[in-house]
Image (cartoon, helix red, strand yellow):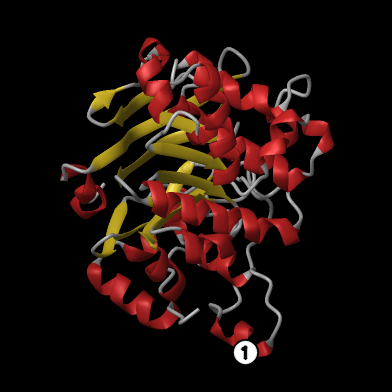
Amino acid sequence: MPASFMEVATTDREILRVENLKKHFPISKDKAVEAVDGVSFAMPEGEVFGLVGESGSGKSTVAYTVIGMYKATSGRIIYRSQDITKTYNRRSLALKKEVQIVFQDPGSSLNPRQTIGQILDMPLSVHRLCTGQDRVRRIQELLEMVELPPDFMFKYPRNIGGGEKQMVSIARALATNPSFVILDEPTSALDVSVQAKVINLLIRLQKQFGLSYLFITHDLGLMRNLAHRVAIMYLGKVCEVATAQEFFTNPLHPYTRMLLSSIPVLTEAEEDLKPKRFTSRGEIPSPVNVPPGCSFHLRCPEASGQCSITDPSWAEASSGHEVRCHLYTSASCIQAGAGARGAEW
């Protein structure tokens, strides 16, 4: 991993560092699903870091391993200079208060037998944040924070819409005054008309409270206006990392260009701004039998013989922009590729 990729990890404001994280799910004596295979990244405090990829790329598994729902196969997870990789380290109430998660489907993440008030009261009770009437006032504050009326505290999840359920999930995550929030595709289960409202709410809350977000999504459009930096995952590995602006104006990895070229647009002018149409070959390989060499080479029209033999190393395109591809093993290759493939998209 080039030094510039981990440069943020040397600052005093680092909030999360993931080092060579692996999570494999055994399915037999000699086989395992390599859901996450050597992922590394670092986040400074207050950053929105986007983790993007197709379904099955391993992005949600990264989130669940960081939060402690899965035990890491190997690697390290460091939160505010504290190694929290081991399972017993996740049981700390102080850590659970600091790190929260908002799940993809609010319908299944909220207890249908509890009122909204009871759902929001749970983290307040567990962490002993307030008592009596103060707790009721805090629940009302949380509802107001996510733009819901106070009388929602008496309703059940079945009585409210999908977008309102997700707002309750966000309010529950904020109840403990966390510093770090994992957002696991928080808008993918919502209607398009509701998605924008939820995203605007998340942006406002992030700025208001200085939150750090690990944002998991397959929607590239969200990342352009929401994330500070973006990492692209494919078959359990990160293949490109860049600032959001650099990611959209100068995509380098063939997989990144494929994703960007597939974004639907409404006008020909928007189509002209996208990278040149990139058509992949074949199907996504099974994570049980990941191909040797570069895991994308079976689908990549630019693959060479080396791609099927050797897993590519990281190459630095510019400060904060790294790509893991044999096409960019030297600075001259990166500059040539940037000029030919970059687009003001």
Seen in the picture, residue 253 relative to 61 is either above or below; the reply is below
Q: Residue furthest bottom?
A: 269
| Mark 1 burial class by Cα count in 10 Å: few <14, some 14-19, many 20+ | few
Q: Position of residue 82 (x, y in %)?
A: 25, 24
Determine whether the residue tagged by mark 1 lies in a helix, strand or loop: helix
Seen in the picture, residue 289 relative to 204 is either above or below; the reply is above
Q: Position of residue 70 (x, y in %)?
A: 51, 21
Name the residue located 63 percent from the left edge and 18 percent from the top edge.
27
Q: Which amino acid, mark 1?
A: Ala
Q: Position of residue 103 (x, y in %)?
A: 61, 36
* Numbered label tally: 1
Observer-nearest of 273 and 43: 43
Judge left or right: residue 192 versus residue 86: right
Judge left or right: residue 234 versus residue 242: right
Observer-nearest of 295 and 255: 255
Judge left or right: residue 94 versus residue 102: left
Q: Is residue 49 visible?
A: no
Q: Position of residue 240 (x, y in %)?
A: 41, 56
Tell me the residue that label 1 is attached to. Answer: 269
Name the residue located 55 percent from the left edge and 37 percent from the top edge.
142
Q: Is residue 75 visible?
A: yes
Q: Residue furthest front?
A: 133
Name the residue located 35 percent from the left edge and 48 percent from the top edge.
210
Name the residue located 24 percent from the left edge and 41 percent from the top edge.
14
Observer-nearest of 309 and 215: 215
Which quadrant of the structure image shows residue 266? Answer: bottom right
Seen in the picture, residue 202 relative to 137 is either above or below; the reply is below
Observer-nearest of 212 and 268: 212
